[in-house]
Image (tube, rainbow, N blue to C red):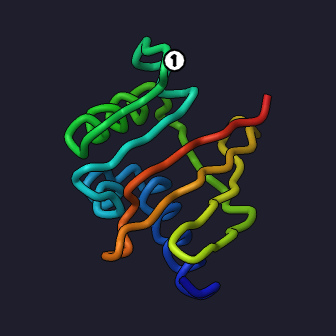
Amino acid sequence: MTREEAWSLANHWVAAWNAHDLELIMTHYEEAIELISPVAAQLLGSANGKVVGKANLKAYFQKGLEAYPDLRFQLEDVLWGVHSVVFYYTNQKGTHTAEFMDLSRAGKVARVVAHYSA
């Protein structure tokens, strides 16, 4: 992964979320995606905050878009590794978020671990 590839992925990802385009959002994820997030724990009433599989992730994201109709992300920074990225952004409430994403060989997100500020 190069700096340019990481920023391109991040900008495309943020644009999809800001457009609230669920189908476009889902193009970034592998079928066997695993997401771990405190927001997932809250919205789904699940202690481990884990969502597994693309169909379950889509249902979770749909629920999130409905729960937060004014959802908007402002990309602050992108960090890249060999086969991973971290997107650091601020949401519409001013909360800072960092999402660590493992990428597959196809360049799609295979695993996400989300972290939030207070």
Q: Mark 1 points at which residue?
A: 42
Amino acid beneath label 1: Gln
Q: In this view, does 4 lie above or below 116?
A: below
Q: Which residue is drawn at 41% across and 36% down?
A: 65
User: At x 40% / y 49%, what residue is drawn?
Assistant: 20
Viewer-nearest residue: 91 or 114: 114
Give x and y (percent) for residue 71: 54, 41
**Which of the image's four quarters has the C terminus?**
top right
All told, the count of numbered labels is 1
x 54%, y 38%: residue: 70
Residue 38 as seen in the image, left or right of residue 117 = left
Identify the image quadrant of residue 79.
bottom right
Most foreground residue, 17 or 101: 101
Residue at the (52%, 57%) spot, across then down: 101
Element type at marker 1? Answer: helix
Q: Which of 80 and 74 is in front in this view?
A: 80
Left or right? Give the position of 32 relative to 99: left
Residue 49 screen position, x and y as percent: 48, 25
